[in-house]
Image: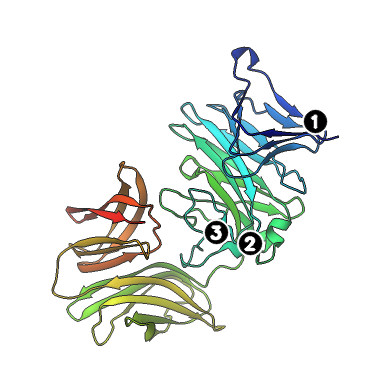
Amino acid sequence: MSSRYLFIFPLLMFSGSSFSQSRLVMTGASHIVIDHAAKLVVENPASNAVSTTGSGGIMTESEFDQVIWNVGVNTGTYVVPFVSQAPVTQIPFTLSIVTAGTGAGRMLFSTYPGAVADNNTYRPSDVTHMFDHNTGSVNNSSHTIDRFWIADASGYVIKPAAVLEFTYRDSEHLQSGNAIVEASLGAQRFNSSTNQWGDYLPQGTTNTATNTTANVPASPGNFFRSWTLSEVSNPLAVELNYFKASCSSSGTLLAWQTASETDIDHFEIEYYDQQQFRVIGFIQPTGSGTGTENYTFQPSPAQSGVFRLAEVTTDGNRIIRSSVSATCDENTESTVSYNSDQQALNLRFEGESESAEPLQIYDAGGKLVFETLLEITKGMNAITLPDLFLSPGMYIVRLKNGRNIIAEKVLAAN
């Protein structure tokens, strides 16, 4: 008969030096349920300190029901014998540390599924969105498995370098509302410093027979806490490097650059006329499909406001790719503001020269919460960064502009 243990308070195991070789071994169908934000703390740093010899394992119900393994500066293959919620199924998670971290570090593990296909409704606390990589505005949950994993390398000065392996259930990619090609699944982690998934494109190899995604590299710089699996067999047609606006003697000048183009019929430029977006221009692709291509468009008559770039594919699909705000008039005063309703940062400044410069956003405690590289043109620049999703509070926006530094406070309201 299987046994079930419910922990609703923090549990410390293997804490005394005399128990340094103690192990937790689950036999048969026994399993441990960690619930109500409880913690199972494993002080033994050995990779065999937790194991199972049967069909049992450890069940976590949510993000903060955690196994805390004080791995420290050790290397080895650490298998967390997770089991799923009903029906109970073994879904182990494997962390193979190939280069030890430095400092008094520990690993915090948990995993939990979602009851619906929309991952945006149950994402981890540090994850701000489930947008796709190419447009940054489309909920990509239908191409994302209905489960998250927490693998939090906490307390390290330098995090370990590791290889990860994930196990999932078929129901988590077959759930109604998903459109997942299982063999194309790869692992992604969420960069909580820059609020991005796509700076680490899906990694690993998926075995559809064993429901595992293996050989997922996690370098110290890419070892963030929240992970999931997304499929990438249906990428969008254009890889867009940037879409920006600048001011010329004739008014607003829009420019964009693509890194690749596939099955593109044409681009469309939209302008918001205070009531709706309307198409004001059509641009034919100039590239062969690969390599960098540059485009410009100047609205006529001269217009200021919000512009959008759309792509239309050869099969008739129309996709909004990016938006930008431009104000080109005689006012040359630099301004930085944050629109809490649109979660957008708006910048207006005189560029000293054409260059790529880092923009950083720091919270009130001095922590870097967002960083990106801006393409700056000589002359007046009007740039909008959408979908930042800053928590309420005061922030410092810092941008190098030639020899000068722009440093402005902005407020993100409730």
Which callout, 3 or 1, points at the residue further toward the start of the chain?
Answer: 1
Counting from the top left corner in percent of width and height, residue 67 is at 61, 34
Residue 155 in view in this figure: yes
Question: Is 73 or 370 nearer to us in this picture?
Answer: 370
Asked if disc 2 and disc 1 are in contact, CB closer than 8 Å, the reply is no
Q: Amino acid at mark 1?
A: Thr
Counting from the top left corner in percent of width and height, residue 195 is at 43, 53
> What residue appears at the point 41 percent right and 48 percent down from the top-left corner?
193
Question: Is 348 or 261 nearer to us in this picture?
Answer: 348
Q: On screen, 222 above or below 172?
A: above
Q: Amino acid at mark 3?
A: Asn
For disc 2, the marked residue is: 117
Say few, some or many: other residues with alpha carbon within 10 Å of mark 3 (under 14 / 14 to 19 / 20 or more).
Answer: some
Q: On screen, 71 above or below 221?
A: above
For disc 1, the marked residue is: 27
Counting from the top left corner in percent of width and height, residue 219 is at 50, 42
- Find numbered disc 1 in the image and state the secondary structure of the residue it sits on: loop
Please tell me how many numbered marks the rendered image carries.
Answer: 3
For disc 3, the marked residue is: 120
Residue furthest to the right: 1
Which callout, 2 or 1, points at the residue further toward the start of the chain?
Answer: 1
- Find numbered disc 3 in the image and state the secondary structure of the residue it sits on: helix
217 left or right, relative to 409: right
- Find numbered disc 2 in the image and state the secondary structure of the residue it sits on: loop
Residue 121, picture quadrant: bottom right
User: Considering the image in quadrants, where does the C terminus appear?
Assistant: bottom left
Counting from the top left corner in percent of width and height, residue 355 is at 26, 61
